[in-house]
Image: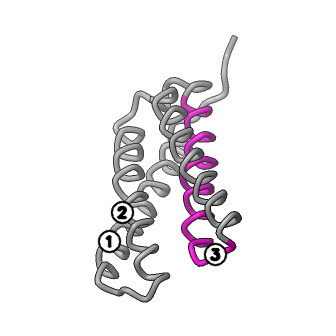
Amino acid sequence: MGVRLIKISVVYFVIGVLLGYYMSTAHAYNLTPVHVHINLLGWTSLTLAGILYVLFPNLAATKLAKAHFWLHNIGLPAMMIGLAFMVYGNTSLTFATIISANLVTLAVILFAVNILMNLKEKTE
């Protein structure tokens, strides 16, 4: 689970960098909220979660970890597409954006619950 999260976080990193590159070369910064969210919720958050799951394999073995992975990675792309539409004034995906934002929020809460319930000090 940890390695899978780290690998998918790199995909978000590439998307975020490419979006940032596009914005800077085109001098069009409308998609800044999408860029920021992809980098923070995709690259940074999932990398850190993946590292924690690698360091503490008992965390990765839980149903909470699996739910976190799937909810986060279904919700985030959908939320970013909806947010991009909204930034350009198209509100047709507003409801989908709200639903997907709730999925990501739930994923983060499940991750936090997993950490608080299952993280134990390593014994050597």
What is the spatial separation of the Cα atoms under label 2 and label 1, in whole angstroms? 9 Å
**Does the CB distance between marks 2 and 1 fall below 8 Å?**
yes
Residue hosting label 1: 99
- Residue 117 vs residue 66: left or right? right
For label 2, the SS is helix
Tell me how far mark 2 sits from mark 3, CA to CA.
22 Å
Q: Report the residue that reaches farthest toward the front.
A: 26
Q: Amino acid at mark 3?
A: Ala
Asked whether 3 falls inside the magenta stretch, the response is no
Q: List x then y, in percent, for residue 87.
A: 49, 82
Please name the amino acid that badge 2 sits on. Answer: Ala
The percent position of residue 101, horizontal first and vertical second, equals 41, 68
Q: Nearer the viewer, mark 2 or mark 3?
A: 3
Q: Is residue 41 magenta?
A: yes
Mark 2, residue position:
78
Q: Earlier in the sequence, mark 3 or mark 1?
A: 3
Give the extent of the magenta segment: 27-53
